[in-house]
Every structure is written in C-alpha cells, then in structure tokens.
Image (spheres, rainbow, N blue to C red):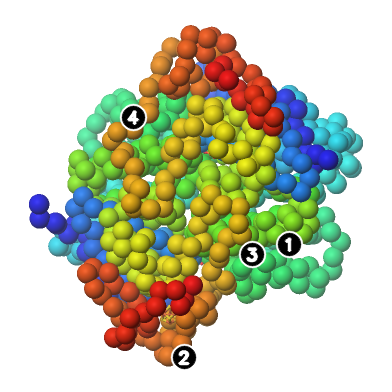
C-alpha cells in the first residue's frame, strides 16, 4: 500500500503577541500525518503541544497569535483566512478532541442537544436519527445509561464522561485527520483501553490519520507508529515509536523515559529543574539549563536538525559531530 | 490516629430535564466507610463516573453527605459548631480535577494562591507576597508567573498553581483529585517526589484520586478501589498490591498499558464487554459486566468483608 500524506505541516511557527512583542511558542515544527498512521506527540507541560494542535485547526484568535508556516491537507493549503471554509473543514475532514473538555461545551445546552446539533451541521440526518446515533456511540465508549447522560448539562457530568462525549462526536464524523489532545487524561484505564480500541478501529477502517498528544507513555507506546518529542517549542527528536523507547537520543527524551514510576516505591529519578519561562526563552538550546551534558556551544546552537539516520532525527549538538555519543554520559 | 474517618457516607444527586419529567436520581456515593491514617496517603482508583470526585469533595468538607458521619481528628465535622467548622476547613484542602473551573479567570495566579492565606492566616501584604513566591517556586513555577491569569497557563502549569494554593495553609489533609492528569511524566515525577517529601516532613496526609495506577502505587500507603459508588476492595498496605482480587480490580490492572512498544497489547483479542442487561437493582453493582457473575451476584449485593489481614473485598467469590 502506498503511504499517503494526509496532512503536511512545514515550518510551523506560532508566536504570542504580547505588548508589542512577539513571543515564540511553537518554533519550526514540521511533521506529516499519514493515512492510517498515528503520530504521537509528547513533551514537557507548557512546551506548546496544545497550541500546535489549535493552530492546525485555525482555532487561535487572530489578534493574539501569529501563525506562520504551511499546513497542507491532501496537498492543498488550508484556507485559514476564509472563516466559513475552515469552519466547514473542521468537524468534517479534520476533527479535534480538546484537552479541556468542559470548555468546548455550551453550558446552556444539554449534552444531547450539543451532540445532535453538531452532528446535524455536518451530516444530513433528522434530529431523531441523530439522537439514536449519539446513544449508540456513547454505549460503544462504555458509558452506561447514555439516555440519562444526554439529558444532563455539562456541569452535571464527570470529566471523563464529557471527554467521551467529545470523542464520540469525533468518531462519528469519521474524519480524514483526527487531532486528539490528551483524549484519555481524565479517564480510568479500563475506559481508556476502550477508547483507544475505538480510535484504533477508526484508524484501521477509515484510514484516519491521527495526531495523538499524550503524556502517558503507555498510551503512546500502544498507539503511535511514530513519536515526536517537543521541548521549549521545538520538536527535539522524532523517530519511529520503537526507536524512541529503545534508543532515545536527546538528553530530554532520555530523562523522560527514566522518570516514569514503573511500579516502584524508590524515589523517582527526575529531571531536575523546570523549563525556562516563555518570556525568558533565549537563543540556543532550550534544554541547556537542565541538560547534564550541555557544553558552552549549546548556547549558540541554532536548533537545526543535527542528526537524521533511518528516520530518527534529533536536534542536539551532541549529535553534530562524527564521533559516537556515549549513551550513559548524560543520565 | 486517623486524620479523617468517613462512616457510611452517601450522596445522591437528583435532576430533571424538563419540569414535567420525573426526577432522576443518581447515587454517586453509596455508604462508603474509609479512614486515613495521619501522615499516610490513601489511594483511590475506580471507573470514571464512579463517584471518586464526589467522595473527595465530601472528605474535603465541600459537599455535604446526605447520610453518614465524618470525623476529623476524631471530632465530628457535621455536628460541630460553626466556628469550629471554619477551623476545620483550613485543615482540609482540595486540588480539583478540573482546575480551570476551580480558579477565578479574572484573578492572577498570585491572587489565587493568596486566597486561602488571606482567609486563614493573618499576614501582612509583604509576607503574603513572599509566601506566594515561595509556593510558586516549590511547585516549580517562576516568581513572575504570579502576575499571569489562569488562561495564560498551560494545563499542567495551572494544575501546579492549584497545588500551590492547597499547600498554602499547611493543611492536615489534602484531597488530590487527579492532580497529575495534565502533567507530563517528568513534571509528574517532580510533583510526586514533592508530595512524598511533604508527607514525610510535615506529616501531611492525602486522599489521592488518580487513574494512573503506577503513580498511586508510588505515593500511597493504602488503596481503595471504587465501582459505581461502592468501595469494592481495600488494602491497608500497598505492598499487598499483588493480592488485589476483585474482578473489577483485576480488569483495572490488566488494562494498564506498559510503556514499552515491545509489549503492545492486541486490542482486538480482548473483548471484555459482556454486559448482561436486565439485572435487578438488588445485585452486585459489577454483576452486569463481571465475567464471573453467578446467580447469587445478580440478586444480592456483597458487602465489604475482610478476606485476610488488612485486605477487604466485596465479592461473593471471596
Ligand atoms: N492564551 C494564552 N495566553 C498566553 N500564553 C499562553 C496562552 N495559552 C498558552 N500559553 C502559553 O503557551 C505555552 C504553550 O502552551 P500549551 O497549552 O501549548 O502547552 P502544552 O504543551 O499543551 O502543555 P500541557 O501539557 O500542560 O497541556 C505555555 O507556556 C503557556 O503558558
Ligand atoms: N452536580 C451534579 N448533579 C448531578 N449529577 C452529578 C453531579 N455531580 C456528579 N454527578 C454524577 O455523580 C456521578 C459521580 O460523579 P463523580 O464526578 O464523582 O465521578 P468520578 O468518579 O470523579 O469520575 P471521573 O473519574 O470521570 O472524574 C456521575 O454519574 C455524575 O454524573
Ligand atoms: S543541545 Fe546541548 S544543551 Fe541541548 S540537549 Fe543537546 S547537549 Fe543538552
Ligand atoms: Mg496542552
Ligand atoms: Mg472525578
């Protein structure tokens, strides 16, 4: 089967306009989403994952954010300037599950009203059919008593219930591209399992391309074919899933893999420190202050790709030279 | 000494969609009895929507139970005089699951964190500010962040603001409702270490609600598993983790995804939904989904009973 690029993102830069300054939040991000494949996106909290997702859908307010770079859907540049067109695309060919479920619901509508309205703006079905579809979808996602849920208002539902309603809507659309920002964060593992199963089915049956943001390395290991690691707005490492887990290269990725509490009571091995604040981002590698193998020239590093072998690319000066990098030196 | 004891607490919610419809009632928490030893952490896991948040709110004194008794350091919370109840409120803090909804969007982070300080401690403005700065640093944010508004933080950063707010008045018990859910692994590890340190240093106690079982294992000393409003299994010592045996707990453990692409689960094979409709209201709440359900499970509800030392299970098979 020929792999088809469904969404192609190149040189995406997003900056926040703040008091006559431009603060760059997402920096030079490129990736492509392929048919029937899942790209996992992981990274430090606040590194710009959600902003990346929102910008792909043209959901950032124009007067506060500046978005540069090119995003092509099936070879065509996305019409960000045409509000009506982008709105129609959103929901039909490109669907998104947001990180914060409650904010994407209208507090004055019951969940059922929200569900049927959304379905009906994109598909021609009667209200009654829409209602039936909704109930079916919710049952599939392991939500007991969907009829009851449909009559409730968003604030009356638990976080996990709302998240499933959003996923159900996205699943129903069978989009070409699904952008799922932490789709299972407020769910327990059994429901998470069920949802991942549904997402896998969507991927296999409708060949939907997915961008899956998650900080749960278990979810990423299970779902992703390829993984991109973000830090300080840059994608610092990208490789096939197995490579990222078995052979992480970037010092941040290595630290990340070690800090997971894998059923121990021993003190967790943490990456010391926190990422620099957005306002203070400067030149050079954003990981510099926390990196155990940082060198002086890292501060002058222009963050271009330094190594790319066999689909494994990394942005770190350690990999700029020819010599072999000692894996243990940095952790 | 128990910091907190909940005895047979229940909470129902009723709502209706249209005024002519009959009221529907959801029993979010059904007669739960749990206690938390001082300086320890009780982990609470369970299905989404099973009432963990509701129970957490009851424990934190935010939600009143319809029934039951809550004791803080041995004295009743519900029947104490008002003045004493206010003092008790200081000892119980909660980090909410939906942190966006629990902070005022028009208050800066500094004001959000300073709120309990103003309410419960008598400090002057400089002292308060110093404390807020220190708290921000404790949870790994920058001092300058205190001027930011909630909308300007990422999900994980805001969660840390909420943790800082809960820590502000050095309470006895903190209810942590999914405090890690929007943090990435490296920050999670930092917060987990921080919480473990605070527990050791100040003898803080936690009710730790999470679906991240590995994190629960790390921080907790005891563990309760909830299903549809009931506690179905309880171990007083987390090292007995392997002994968890309630069918729901077993399913929970088998759904944990290992962070290793070499151990990917085959999603097709595991068809765990064998829902049996038509069970009466009397039976075990898990019977509809339980692979081991027998006739008895469908008509009598099992109570929580001690199956071995420090190990309680609510299932007819044990
Ligand atoms: N509306 C806003 N105004 C100002 N700054 C913002 C706004 N939204 C986000 N930011 C900042 O942009 C940065 C990136 O945020 P983003 O939400 O993309 O992070 P994230 O990677 O999704 O993190 P998390 O894993 O915690 O959700 C953060 O440092 C955040 O503080
Ligand atoms: N204010 C309310 N009005 C009506 N029903 C409510 C209200 N709050 C909660 N419920 C119901 O009570 C039940 C338990 O909700 P709760 O939020 O405690 O679940 P939870 O275990 O925290 O779930 P999650 O893991 O998804 O957060 C749910 O069925 C929910 O719909
Ligand atoms: S570029 Fe330098 S500072 Fe950045 S991760 Fe690599 S070694 Fe560390
Ligand atoms: Mg985010
Ligand atoms: Mg909850």
Residue mark closest to the camera, 4 vs 3: 4
Marked residue chain, label 1: B
| Drawn side of residue A266 relative to residue A81, left or right | right
List x then y, in percent, for residue A253.
42, 67
- Alpha carbon of mark 2 to alpha carbon of mark 3: how far? 29 Å
* Quadrant of the image containing the C terminus of chain B: top right
Q: Dot 2: what SS? A: helix
Marked residue chain, label 2: A
Where does label 2 land, which residue? A296
Where does label 3 land, which residue? B139
Q: Nearer the viewer, residue B62 or B171?
A: B171
Q: Nearer the viewer, residue B73 or B222?
A: B222
Where does label 4 land, which residue? B271
- Alpha carbon of mark 2 to alpha carbon of mark 4: how far? 55 Å
Upstream in the sequence, badge 4 or badge 3?
A: 3
- Alpha carbon of mark 4 to alpha carbon of mark 3: how far? 42 Å
Marked residue chain, label 4: B
The structure residue drawn at horizontal position 52% and vertical position 13%, both measured from the top left corner, is B297
Q: Are marks 2 and 4 on the same chain?
A: no
């Amino acid at each position: 089967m020929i792999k088809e690029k469904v969404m192609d993102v190149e040189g995406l830069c997003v900056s926040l306009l703040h008091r006559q300054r431009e603060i760059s939040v997402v920096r030079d991000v490129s990736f492509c989403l392929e048919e029937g494949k899942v790209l996992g996106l992981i990274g430090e909290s606040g590194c710009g994952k959600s902003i990346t997702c929102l910008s792909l859908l043209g959901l950032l307010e124009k007067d506060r954010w500046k978005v540069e770079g090119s995003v092509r859907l099936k070879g065509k540049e996305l019409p960000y300037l045409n509000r009506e067109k982008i709105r129609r695309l959103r929901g039909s060919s490109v669907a998104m599950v947001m990180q914060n479920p409650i904010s994407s619901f209208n507090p004055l509508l019951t969940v059922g009203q929200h569900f049927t309205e959304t379905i009906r703006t994109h598909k021609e079905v009667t209200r009654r059919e829409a209602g039936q579809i909704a109930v079916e979808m919710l049952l599939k996602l392991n939500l007991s008593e969907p009829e009851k849920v449909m009559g409730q208002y968003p604030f009356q539902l638990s976080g996990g219930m709302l998240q499933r309603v959003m996923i159900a809507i996205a699943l129903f659309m069978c989009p070409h591209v699904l952008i799922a920002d932490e789709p299972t964060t407020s769910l327990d593992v059994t429901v998470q399992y069920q949802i991942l199963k549904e997402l896998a089915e969507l991927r296999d049956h409708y060949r939907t391309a997915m961008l899956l943001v998650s900080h749960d390395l278990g979810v990423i290991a299970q779902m992703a074919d390829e993984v991109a690691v973000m830090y300080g707005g840059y994608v610092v490492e990208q490789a096939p899933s197995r490579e990222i887990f078995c052979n992480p290269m970037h010092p941040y990725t290595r630290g990340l893999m070690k800090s997971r509490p894998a059923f121990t009571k021993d003190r967790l091995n943490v990456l010391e420190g926190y990422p620099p604040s957005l306002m203070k981002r400067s030149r050079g590698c954003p990981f510099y202050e926390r990196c155990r193998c940082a060198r002086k020239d890292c501060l002058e590093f222009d963050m271009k790709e330094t190594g790319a072998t066999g689909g494994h690319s990394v942005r770190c000066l350690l990999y700029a030279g020819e010599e072999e990098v000692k894996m243990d030196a940095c952790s | 000494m128990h910091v907190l004891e909940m005895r047979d607490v229940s909470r129902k919610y009723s709502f209706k969609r249209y005024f002519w419809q009959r009221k529907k009632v959801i029993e979010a928490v059904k007669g739960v009895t749990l206690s938390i030893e001082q300086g320890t952490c009780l982990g609470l896991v369970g299905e989404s929507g099973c009432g963990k948040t509701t129970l957490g709110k009851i424990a934190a004194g935010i939600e009143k139970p319809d029934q039951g008794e809550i004791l803080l350091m041995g004295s009743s919370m519900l029947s104490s005089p008002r003045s004493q109840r206010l003092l008790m409120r200081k000892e119980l803090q909660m980090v909410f699951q939906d942190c966006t909804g629990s902070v005022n969007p028009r208050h800066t982070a500094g004001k959000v964190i300073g709120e309990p300080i103003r309410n419960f401690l008598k400090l002057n403005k400089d002292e308060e500010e110093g404390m807020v700065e220190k708290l921000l640093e404790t949870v790994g944010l920058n001092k300058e962040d205190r001027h930011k508004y909630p909308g300007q933080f990422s999900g994980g950063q805001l969660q840390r603001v909420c943790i800082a707010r809960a820590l502000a008045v050095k309470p006895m018990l903190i209810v942590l409702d999914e405090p890690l859910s929007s943090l990435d692994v490296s920050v999670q590890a930092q917060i987990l270490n921080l919480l473990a340190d605070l527990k050791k240093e100040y003898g803080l106690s936690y009710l730790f609600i999470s679906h991240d079982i590995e994190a629960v294992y790390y921080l907790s000393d005891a563990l309760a598993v909830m299903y549809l409003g009931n506690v179905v299994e309880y171990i007083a010592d987390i090292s007995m983790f392997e002994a968890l045996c309630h069918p729901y707990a077993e399913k929970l453990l088998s759904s944990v995804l290992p962070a290793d692409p070499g151990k990917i689960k085959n999603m097709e094979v595991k068809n765990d939904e064998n829902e049996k409709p038509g069970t009466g209201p009397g039976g075990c709440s898990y019977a509809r989904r339980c692979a081991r359900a027998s006739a008895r499970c469908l008509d009598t509800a099992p109570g929580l009973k001690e199956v071995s030392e420090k190990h309680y299970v609510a299932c007819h098979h044990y």
